[in-house]
Image: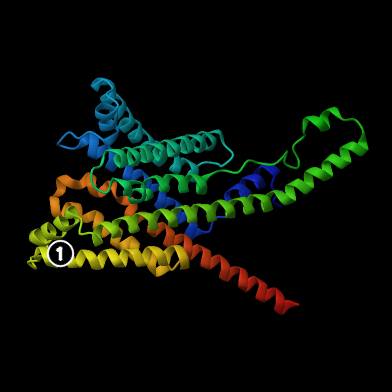
Amino acid sequence: MNSPPSHRESSRDQARQRFLTPTTTTAMWWLRWVVLIQCIGVVGRYLLSSVETESDIYGWLYFDLHWPESLCQGIDDFGMVLTLVAAVVIGVAGWCRSKCDPVSIVASIAHWSDQVALVWVAVWMLALSLAHMIRASVYGELALAEHAVRYAAPIALLMLSWRPVSMGHPVGEPSSLLKKGSDPLRRFEFTMLQQRLQRVRPLFQQAASRGRGKMALSVLVLAAAATFLAHGYKAMECYAPFTDLILLSDLQWTGFGFSQSTAERALVAIGVLDAIVAIALVVFRFRIAAAYMAIWGWVTAASRMSALGLDAWPETVLRAANGGVPFVILLLLVAQLAAQQHSAQQNSAQFESE
């Protein structure tokens, strides 16, 4: 006969069987890849590009604050290198957390390394957006909204992947109070308290996880909407670089012979549609809006290479979140719908049994 599982084995099983549905797990992995890829894009633009480029952080420190050039260059390069290290940590830590025993030391190290790396990426992306807002001469006031998905993605992943703190001593493991206490009644009461904590712990963890999941979804939705509204406004204003992307892509690939006026009319239509789907996503959480935003976000990111050539790969990779974040939103909305349907089926089955 098989021996009953030990408490340590059951606790490991409970740790593995979290609140996450397969679709939510897939969304987390997509979000992880989005954060990792955009980090590579940032490093590619400022460190690996064939033409050396300095970030707006360098420009702000050197031209506006008049710091020494070597110090500004060092800060800029250090931030980019640290972002590359964070990308490696996010990838490796994510793999370790999925493969290792959740209660092992390796998993604990991977968890905290992952959290620190995600915090750094969020801070650095936000710093780049703030510096661009200060330095940009055209539409700089839209920088925080335009780049919202870049710093919101690591924040949302931080929320979704946070490991809840365990509550109390598991049943079966002696506590220091029980070792010291000699009163049988006190020992019995404390054991009963441990058992009650053990029963309610999964409920608290599930409630906390659902709360973090809803907060992460809200962060992603607001960020995606802000990015599309900012891009939509610039498109309706016929932002010149957007017009160039259409004309150059047509010249190199489609050959339709778009004129300047045709490209500008298309931009106005695109901008209006971007604003509509952004509002629809925030107000109604339409899955079709998230699907459109995901597809169009990837198309616009790829347009950098279709218009400017393969050397513009950092510009495309940097914008991975433009389509990646709406796609993660779509997965989370599908998971939310599946959970609601499952709950409704359970309630219906319970009602029929009664």
Residue sitting farthest toward the bottom: 352
The coloring applied to the image is rainbow
Q: Disc 1 residue type?
A: Ala
Residue 348, position as x, y percentages in the image: 66, 76
Asked if 348 appears above or below 234 in the picture, the reply is below
Left or right of residue 342: residue 228: left
Residue 13, position as x, y percentages in the image: 62, 49
Residue 79, position as x, y percentages in the image: 33, 31
Q: Is residue 185 visible?
A: yes
Look at the numbered disc 1 and give the secondary structure of its residue.
helix
Asked if 200 appears above or below 180 in the picture, the reply is below
Residue 36, position as x, y percentages in the image: 36, 43
Asked if 163 appears above or below 176 in the picture, the reply is below
- In the depicted view, which residue is nearer to us: 200 or 73? 73
Left or right of residue 32: residue 253: left
Q: Is residue 17 visible?
A: no
- In the depicted view, which residue is nearer to us: 224 or 262? 262
Q: What residue lies at 33% left-to-right and 66% top-to-bottom? A: 292
Marker count (numbered): 1
- Image quarter where the C terminus lies is bottom right
Q: What residue lies at 74% left-to-right and 37% top-to-bottom? A: 173
Q: What residue lies at 55% left-to-right and 33% top-to-bottom? A: 105
Residue occupied by mark 1: 263
- In the depicted view, which residue is nearer to us: 105 or 33? 33
Left or right of residue 250: residue 298: right
Q: Residues within 10 Å of mark 1 (few under 14, many from 20)?
A: some
